[in-house]
Amino acid sequence: MTFRKTGKGYIIRMFKGEKVIETLTKFCEKENIRGAYFHGLGAVSEAEFGYYDLSKKEYAFTKYNNMMEVVSMTGNVALFKGDTVLHVHGIFSDTENKTLGGHIKEATVGVTVEVHVTDCEERIERKYDEEIGLNLMELGN
């Protein structure tokens, strides 16, 4: 991974073989990013993504082991009990330009992944929501 600091954030380029979520998480920890949003694109050689089943209060994931374009990836960064947590969604296209998408558990860079991170310059915390079954942002309105 390589990066450049910008006015309110960073431009990141990941290299073939890197784990996207793992790399972004470590980057945010190293740069002390406690609240941010980001978007990106690129190509991955494998990805695991899916959806949240509210009735079961759990994610259902499917793993794809083929080269796919990252048409769009978006997400945010917050803290849960002091740990950096990324919430990431993406749209991927296959060799026939058919798209799939969902909540990204992890993906491996196949060519490159380029991400623009905008630092909110504030600490954003997550708290467990019993009804939903997820750690949701606490924004204090």
Image (spheres, helix red, strand yellow):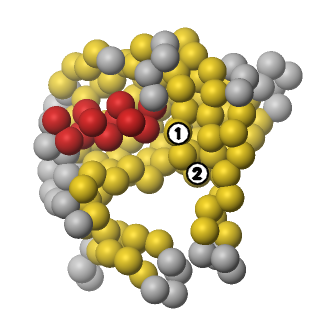
Q: Left of 71 or right of it: where is 119? A: left
Q: Amino acid at mark 1?
A: Glu
Q: CA separation, marks 1 and 2?
A: 9 Å
**Which circle marks residue 27 in the picture?**
none
For the residue pair 89 and 54, the one nearer the viewer reads as: 54
The quarter of the image holding the N terminus is: top left
Q: Residues within 10 Å of mark 1 (few under 14, many from 20)?
A: some
Label 2: which secondary element: strand
Q: Would you identify the image quadrant in which residue 137 lies?
A: bottom left
Q: Which mark is residue 103?
A: 2
Q: Nearer the viewer, mark 1 or mark 2?
A: 1
- Residue drawn where x is 60% and y is 75% of the image: 57
Q: Quadrant of residue 15?
A: top left
Q: Give the number of the disc on residue 106.
A: 1
Residue 111: image x %, image y %?
Answer: 55, 12
Element at badge 1?
A: strand
Q: Position of residue 112 (x, y in %)?
A: 49, 15
Identify the residue at horizontal 40%, vertical 29% (top origin): 115
Q: Quadrant of the C terminus?
A: bottom left
| Residue 42 showing in the rendered view | no
Query: In this rendering, does residue 4 appear at all?
Result: yes
- How many marks the image carries: the answer is 2
User: Residue 132 location, x and y as percent?
Assistant: 52, 80
Q: Amino acid at mark 2?
A: His
Q: Check the image and report above or below for 118 versus 114.
A: below
Q: Residue at x 77, y 25 (%)?
A: 94
Crowding at dot 2, Cα within 10 Å, few <14 / some 14-19 / many 20+, comes out as many
Marks 1/2 in contact by CB < 8 Å: the verdict is no
The residue lying furthest to the right in this view is 96
Q: Position of residue 100 (x, y in %)?
A: 74, 40
The foreground one among 61 and 98 is 61
